[in-house]
Image (cartoon, grey):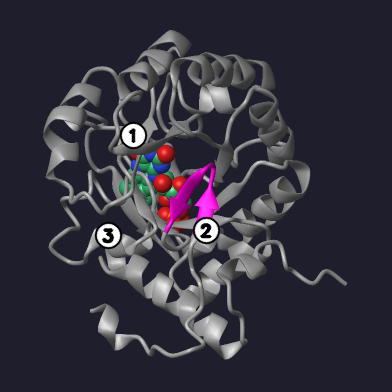
Amino acid sequence: MGGARVSGPATPELTVELAGVRLRNPVLLASGTCGYGEELAPFLDLGELGGIVAKSLSLEPRVGHPPPRIWETPAGMMNAIGLENVGVEAFLKEKLPRLDEGVTVFASVFETEIDRYAEVCRRLSGEERVAGIELNASCPHVEKGGMEFGQDPASLASLVRACRRAADRPLLVKLSPNVTSVAEMARVCEGEGADGVSLINSLQALDVNVETRRPVLRNVLGGLTGPAIRPVALRMVYQVARAVRIPVCGMGGIASGEDAVAFLLCGATAVQVGTANYVNPRAGLEVRDGIETYCRRHGISRVTDLIGALEVP
Ligand SMILES: Cc1cc2nc3c(=O)[nH]c(=O)nc-3n(C[C@H](O)[C@H](O)[C@H](O)COP(=O)(O)O)c2cc1C
């Protein structure tokens, strides 16, 4: 697999450090698009990626929303899964041990109240296999929790403070694009001790079937993802990377090495691949290979040289 790539003296160094975690390359798979890893393991060696961010976990298992909960849109998709997950205990006991030791795993945390968020963080703490925690403060299609915290600076500050106290792992906060100033939200996270920020989660959206006169999703509102949101995500990563000193993990519509490089240039230290996994389960590896090819083509010896290197006239 890896042998297909050209080797030689110009092999670029792809390792990066994200929130204190050393990644073998800057490409992770995004939460909710790679399950708990084992779903994609038949298609690729997850250990060849920078890592994966597992599906958001709550204290107890959650069933999620009724179907239809996924809908294809021009250049993207909408979903309202409703954060269905096995719960933190089953993740630790059943899912995590099935993954190869070489896979870097970030756990994602979602809850409806601050002390419950903190409790999930506490349960994940001390777990060697959990490289870091990503706080999902930005899900746009659940009634309680998620975006509710990510849209209000004071609530976000309380959430990050509580989870920072509870978590002994590196802490990333995943920001919502459904705000007026994403840079302000990132500053709040930095001020409360977050080790990094991830962005963007999906854009709140609605689509309509005019024949039935019904919303396409049973939940009415969903989250838009995929290539359609990439320029919005790039704009936000650019603004956030200039507003904070902590590292930024960028995502939104990445499907190729060039897409990923655009995020690095805008200031992201690492990237996540989400919707593209639904088109091609090997998308993450192809993105990594594409970054390497770009580096060779441009004579770049270390991928870190691309971070924030956007030439702004
Ligand atoms: C079906 C689906 C489920 C998702 N579930 C989660 C989730 O559980 N937690 C989370 O933080 N983000 C979730 N996301 C958002 C993605 O992690 C990512 O932020 C978003 O899809 C943008 O990246 P993309 O355009 O590459 O997909 C989900 C996205 C999709 C498409």
**Element under label 3?**
helix
Q: What's the CA distance linking mark 1 and mark 3?
A: 20 Å
Q: Amino acid at mark 2?
A: Val
Instruction: Residue at 34% x, 70% y: name it.
Output: 285
**Element under label 2?**
strand
Residue placed most toward the observer, 147 or 52:
52
**Mark in the foreground, 2 or 1:** 2
**Quarter of the rendering containing residue 145:** top left
Q: Amino acid at mark 1?
A: Ser
49 inside magenta stretch: no
Residue 245 percent location from the top left of the image:
72, 42
Instruction: Residue at 41% x, 71% y: name it.
Output: 288
Instruction: Residue at 45% x, 15% y: name it.
Output: 166
Residue 101 percent location from the top left of the image:
21, 49
Q: Is residue 115 above or below residue 25?
A: above
Q: Earlier in the sequence, mark 2 or mark 1?
A: 2
Q: Which residues are magenta?
A: 16-23
Mark number for residue 47?
3
- Is residue 156 left or right of 251 when viewed as pictured? right
Instruction: Residue at 58% x, 16% y: name it.
Output: 161
Location of the N terminus by quadrant is bottom left
**Within 8 Å: ligand 1 and the Cβ of disc 1?**
yes
- Is residue 263 left or right of 284 when viewed as pictured? right
Residue placed most toward the observer, 14 or 309:
14
Q: Amino acid at mark 3?
A: Gly
**Quarter of the rendering containing residue 65:** top left
Q: Is label 1 in contact with label 3 (beta carbons under 8 Å)?
A: no
Q: Residue furthest top?
A: 115
> Mark 2 — residue?
16
Residue 300 percent location from the top left of the image:
61, 80
